[in-house]
Amino acid sequence: MFAYILRRLLYAIPILIGVNLLTFALFFVVNTPDDMARLQLGVKHVTPEAIERWKAEHGYDKPLLLNAEATGSAQFTDTIFFQHSAAMFVFKFGKSDDGRDIGNEIRTRMGPSLAIALPVFVIGLLANITFALLMVFFRATYLDLWGVVLCVVLMSISGLFYIIAGQYFIAKLWNLLPISGFAGGIDGLRFILLPVLVSVAAGIGSGARWYRTIFLEEIGKDYVRTARAKGLSEIRVLFHHVLKNGMIPILTGAVVVLPLLFMGSLITESFFGIPGLGSYTIDAIQAQDFAVVRAMVFLGSFLYIVGLILTDISYSWADPRVRLQ
Amino acid sequence: MSFMPVILWTDALIFALLAGVLALAWFIRRHDHLRAPWEAVAQRPMAMGAALVLGVFVVIGLLDSLHYRQRLPDSPADKPQYSVEVMSAFDALVGGLRTRQEKTYSAPLAMQLYAMEFVERDGVAVRDYPRLQYGGAHLQHAGDRASDIARRSLAGAAQGALAGLLLFAGLAAWQARRLRLPVGTWLARWRQGGLNWPGRTLVGMLALLLMLGGAMAQLASGYHVLGTDKVGQDVLYISLKSIRTGLVIGTLTTLVTLPLAIGLGIAAGYFRGWVDDAIQYLYTVLNSIPGVLLIAAAVLIVQVYIESNPELFDTAAARADIRLLALCLIMGMTSWTGLARLLRGESLKLRTLDYVEAARAFGVSNARIISRHIFPNVFHLVLIAVVLDFSGLVLAEAVLSYVGVGVDPSMYSWGNMINGARLELAREPAVWWQLGAAFAFMFALVLAANLFADGVRDAFDPRLGGRR
Amino acid sequence: MKPLLRVAGLVTEIGHDADTLRVVDGVSFHVVAGETYALLGESGCGKSMTALSLMRLLPDGGRIVAGAVQLDGQDVLALPERDMRRVRGGGMAMIFQEPMLALNPVVKVGHQIVEALALHQGLSGQAAREAARGLLDSVGVPDALRRLDSYPFELSGGLRQRAMIAMALAGQPRLLIADEPTTALDVTIQAQVLDVLRSLRSEKRMGMLLITHDLGVVAENADRVGVMYAGELLEEGTRDAFFASPQHPYSRMLFAALPHAIPHGLQPMAVRSPAENSGDGARLTTIPGQVPKLDGRMRGCRFAPRCPFAIARCRDESPDWQAIGEQRVRCHLAGALPQRSAPVATPPPHSTQAAQALLQVDGLKVYFPIRRGFIQRTVGHVRAVDDVTLSIQPGRTLALVGESGCGKTTVGKALLRLIEPTAGSVVLAGETVAARNAATLRRQAQMVFQDPFSSLNPRMRVADILLEGMDALGVGAADQRRAAVALLLRQVGLPDDAGGRYPHAFSGGQRQRIAIARALAVSPRLVICDEPTSALDVSVQAQILNLLKDLQDSLGLAYLFITHNLAVVDYLAHEVAVMYLGRIVEQGPAAQVLRAPRHPYAQALVSAVPRIESPAGQRAIRLAGDQPSPLNPPSGCHFHPRCPHASGICRQIYPDQTALGSGHWARCHWVAAQGQAFTEWSVN
């Protein structure tokens, strides 16, 4: 088990290198620092001097990979690649284009992101499973049929609609909850409620429908018939036998996103004014702040890989047939 | 010539895709085992009703993909000059919708502008809601509006119903002839649902669509049915124009996805070993990067490219089009991994099957085994993935436009509509029609696509069997 | 005697509207406490659906339309669902065919048993655990206490089925329904499980409804027999009467289609076509046609379309029950069927020894590496095939016999280089086979696979399937291949238009014919048949076996016939090699190995096969335990942990071949010692 995790962690390194090289290529080779400067400065102010100044300010005035002017190890270290891409491996994200420390920003913004994303994850999972189990319990009846139709309708609605409609009706028209904002502590609950509600509602259609298929696939298996032949009640068959098997793909599918919860949700945070990593990312994209985008790409990949490892571990925990080698 | 045809990149691809789909359909028709699941789809009322709605969207989208530039009226005959504005066959068809522009916002079916202005009335400047230039301009009194709207809706619906009835009569006559039945017998069968296709649903659905279309057409000739936007453009027109954008994103993206997903997925599963390792590495790397960020980065690159090479694009439409195409490409590059993983797993299973072993026992080459044994047996998965992905992509467009990395801001799209109007909800009274129209159109398309996809999946996925 | 279970006029349907299938149609029978009633029939005849109807556990869309089911006088069909749950498991319990699928994979075995104990006996905690252990003990699970905490996947197939039985017993049922309880198990394990069921029945005086397709299992286990066909019960009677003289033409043909040594007083009837009658007396009787679809309303006797005795009345009027002694039968011709003809002795396979072997395999080894640890180092090997030597003469059949997991299929695939062998030499028609001359090899040797449903690509037309090999190996001129396809189809007895159709249009037997035609397309001299009939019903199996035999006679093919079914071996093979855990333990002429096996494993294997002939006097040899894993085989002779004759030397030294005359040999110290004693004795 330990050897397995260690091997998986080592396997993660080439993937992170790949991610790093890809982002490096995207942000510095295809899209040169000159282009960035031009974009940042705007068409009006572009002069060669302005570009150079901007590059110097942001540390982009170095050679990409190899610094021929420097000597010794500085040949490699005093380059854009080393200072802006390779540094991320030790989580040194550097400064954003507006001069703030990205690492610091990430640390302070993780909390609010998690405050929204975690409840959405937990409540969403519970709601989806409950809804799916209900449909499975009433399978082959009209309740199930209309449940599925409802799911399809819900998943056909744009996620933006849930947010906008939620804000308009619940917050603006009926004044039940604040439209947006965030606060720490118990006071923050009223700010969290609406985004969580909206996100869960937005996800329930596709989630419940997917879980329903998983449960239905399980319920057609032979061991369910055996359980019934024992004389077990339908409820017990469903909760004890079907749920236990169905939870394996559900849980392991959910675990992979667990670390990504830190990243928050782009749209939700942005609409509800949550000072989390999601809105940070969106702001960076809109302000074309490449340093932040690069940092978030690396962070996201890292968390995704952690999620993959957690998935494997959770598999061996949920399914006795799986032994990690 | 009074116009010059313009073939944008996406136009060319869309019609290539159309040709491909038609060729595939022809191929499927000639093969029993390929046709069988489609016949099962054709028997599902829900799927066929959805297909009809999808068909309407597709027709509008295709009409909107026939682009041209009008010749300037005062240009010399020997050296014609053309307008910089790129129009489409659809624009020509709806004519007035495009040109009847108001000053700014107006509510659906309104006669007056949304905002008060100083208007000259009996020589005195009064602050009031001014009458619209086109919307309800034919009416003398505001009081006539309700009855006029009702009259027009009814007339339109009746025209639609009549058209539907005529079509139905034609259908009945044709079908009865084809099946060599008396028309009465055919009608009775149709009424009892005794045909081998969902006749009642389709005819009913068609009649409904025609009536809706008729009423819309009647109303649209005198009003702005869905109101106008900030610059006074008809929201109905914008919504209809956005259909093409949604369709392009939903279809062309998968066109990019498919070769990658099929090629790499099957190769990984079939060859295993280092090929598998390399492909898995590739898709783990791509998968691990948050999709929106990758798209954002790539879109920014395209933007820089467009801005630094303005001479390549002669019209605004061409610029917007290349960005749309780039978006499809990028989304395709980021979204092939899911299908590839699925196909890899399936190929892993298939390669151990006895018929593949039998082919290997004959020394059949790998390329031939893949093309004759593996690919035909995973094709249903590809198809299911394509129809299931379509709706997700349409929805994603809106989100990306909101983030600012979607289609060009000058392009008609539901995402841009929502993005441009979401802050107007805060106004008093709220400007809701633009958002409402975008969401409603998007919902109609996505719901139809989802219902159709459901039918396709049920018919093609052997695991689901007869279960719904 | 008051019956325990009484079923009257049971009708079960599945599906709706136009798709309705009447899978059980008017079935009536009864089971008395302490007796075993066997429902016999081929796949799709409705026997499992009958059992599920009794339990009211029909799949979605299934319903009982008419009839009555009484358990101890209680009307089971009238019970509300809540009370029915007490009957399930409590009144009647059921065990299923595939124990791996029928047990919940993620719940411990003990827990699954305790669940039933809690429900029906109100036990909980330690008491329940004790009771569960007792149940496992009673079905012969060794080390029961530890097994309680095992997951189903940690048990072998035989133990799983025992656990399943223990679970069924937890509710102390009065009736046990066993639905093909041993079909998924190996022959030696099947014998163990059937023993358990037999002793339990007599011990607890349970009634047992045994559902099976295997006449041998019926003969050894049942007291009374009912034969089902197309949803109906056709014949019923006591076992002895039924086996002495089956009355329905269908029953008789089932017997005749079986490829075992023809039992005393039971011979195939004159139902063969003239062509079949003319020469080869050893051909099996086949039942022409197919089981009718159960959708439409059927007129007349359901078997009439396939019945060689059918008269006009059979097609119009459904026959009623007629009593004949201890039997009753639904046939208009009951008792009036022609007497069966005199026994036709099976001529012994002609033993023309060809000079040169077509296939000579020496020291074939196939090892699969096991990788472990941090850098995936190879820490050992699974010795799937360990030093196998065999040879086949042209035009002859060598049967490779063994239980699942013994490596017999791997041998077949390694010969064709579908799996790269680790070591050993293969000489085919005088040419050593290596990777470079694989194409020559593939023209000489081809393979027929077990499952006709997975061995044909569903997306290819039959003609394309047959052409594939010819195209790949460049057999014949391209323009003549189409003609070759037509010839092949005729050769395997398929209609001429079959080439244009897709595999799904064919039944299992027809698909297997296509698979055989595909192998023949490149005119090989050796065909490796990997369990070609084990997925087929008895009557269809007979057709395929006949076909294989005909093809051998007309084309001079040699077969390597890989199978676990000894009856088939007896019918087809000239020589037999018995494999155990990757090694051949005994080899020789078929008659000798099957009639007088010498290796203790071969003896056990032969005696474990359920037989129709009453095994009077012959004491069955029952093996203990399971085949060990090839990952970690026992030292010395692999068989010693299960061997009744094992001695010290067996644990240490892998025995040499002991020649037993006329090419018959075994690898066994015990046999060697006996032989020595014999020689010494004869010399003295």
Image (tube, coloured by chain):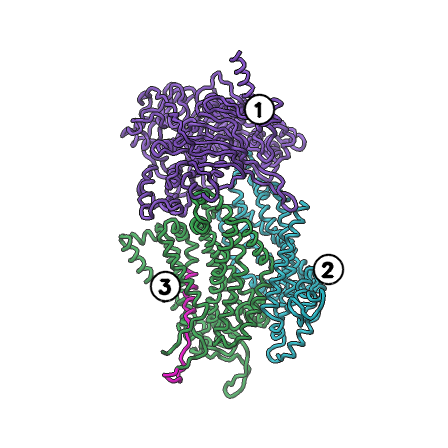
* Tag 1 secondary structure: loop
Q: Which mark is on residue C643?
A: 1
| Tag of residue B161 | 3
Using a 10 Å C-alpha cutoff, classify the residue at mark 2 as few (fewer than 14 neighbours), some (14 to 19) or many (20 or more): few
Q: Is residue C552 magenta?
A: no
Residue A19 location in percent, x, y?
61, 60
Chain in green (letter): B
Q: Is residue C230 visible?
A: no
Range covered by the magenta-colored residues: B52-79
Q: Nearer the viewer, residue B385 or C501?
A: C501
* SS type, badge 2: loop
Q: Is residue C461 left or right of residue B344?
A: left
Q: Chain of mark 1?
A: C
Q: Nearer the viewer, residue C83 or C326?
A: C326
C261 horizontally vs A158: left or right: left
Which chain gets the purple colouring? C
| Residue C668 pos. (x, y %) | 55, 24
Query: Which subunit holds the residue at mark 3?
Result: B
Q: Who's the residue at 45% across and 22% down the image? A: C662
Give the residue pinned by disc 2. A185
